[in-house]
Amino acid sequence: KQEVTQIPAALSVPEGENLVLNCSFTDSAIYNLQWFRQDPGKGLTSLLLIQSSQREQTSGRLNASLDKSSGRSTLYIAASQPGDSATYLCAVSFGTDKLIFGTGTRLQVFP
Amino acid sequence: DAEITQSPRHKITETGRQVTLACHQTWNHNNMFWYRQDLGHGLRLIHYSYGVQDTNKGEVSDGYSVSRSNTEDLPLTLESAASSQTSVYFCASSSTGSTGELFFGEGSRLTVL
């Protein structure tokens, strides 16, 4: 069964810290992987999309890496800010019609 | 700016009633999706459409239906609401199917009493 797991479920860090969020998946034959941000009571906003042929993608203070052979992706957030507080979800495309979401990591950055 | 809007944002209904959740997008995307989000399950796909008159069942489609009569709208209907359908529902659209960047609405919170 194809599964996507995100650990930890929650994380609390002080402002300014660099942090890493983890996403693991059970099948290395993926099409691509997306990282999303979800604020309380809101929809999901796409942050980064990594194709299976890519190793990483960067947007501002965010960097996402992909290691298909080990079934892992990481989202690196540099110099975290209170405004980064949200739930971060990864979603893996295992084919053109199969997108599986992880349950997310709830991040709190305190001043 | 292009957007995707859902209505109503909150709804309370009774078991057995029919409920329709609306989704309207101005991205001109062919591909539209309905997900439900529940604690401990992440987002699960209910139905999806790759164009007008096209609809497909997702992972958790029992008790739900959709219709696609134009590019902009994909309403989700619960034929006979059940308490197990209490959830937050998200509509999404994409220009390149489920493998492309997804744009989400803000969600509809449904409570079935």
Image (cartoon, rainbow, N blue to C red):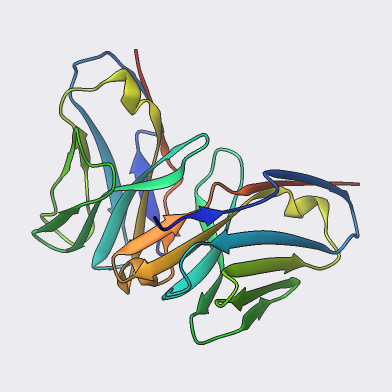
Considering every residue shown, the one lying at the far bottom of the view is A53
**How far from the left and from the top, in percent, is residue A107?**
73, 48
Q: The N terminus of chain A lies in which quarter of the figure?
A: bottom left
**How far from the left and from the top, in percent, is residue A62?**
71, 71
Above or below for A25 versus B73: below
Q: Which residue is drawn at 56% across and 77% down?
A: A69
Above or below for B17 versus A107: above
Answer with the quarter of the image where residue B97 lies. Answer: bottom left
Q: Residue at x 67, y 76 (%)?
A: A59
Q: Residue at x 36, y 55 (%)?
A: B92
**Do we see residue B1 in this rendering?**
no
Left of A24 or right of it: where is B85?
Answer: left
Answer with the quarter of the image where residue A17 lies. Answer: bottom right
**How far from the left and from the top, in percent, is residue A86?**
67, 48
**How far from the left and from the top, in percent, is residue A99?**
38, 61
Q: Residue at x 61, y 60 (%)?
A: A23
Is A75 or B50 nearer to us in this picture? Answer: A75
Left of B40 or right of it: where is A105?
Answer: right
Is A109 or B22 nearer to us in this picture? Answer: A109
Total number of numbered discs in the rendering: 0
Left of A56 or right of it: where is B27?
Answer: left
**Do we see residue B6 in this rendering?**
yes
Left of B18 or right of it: where is B28?
Answer: right
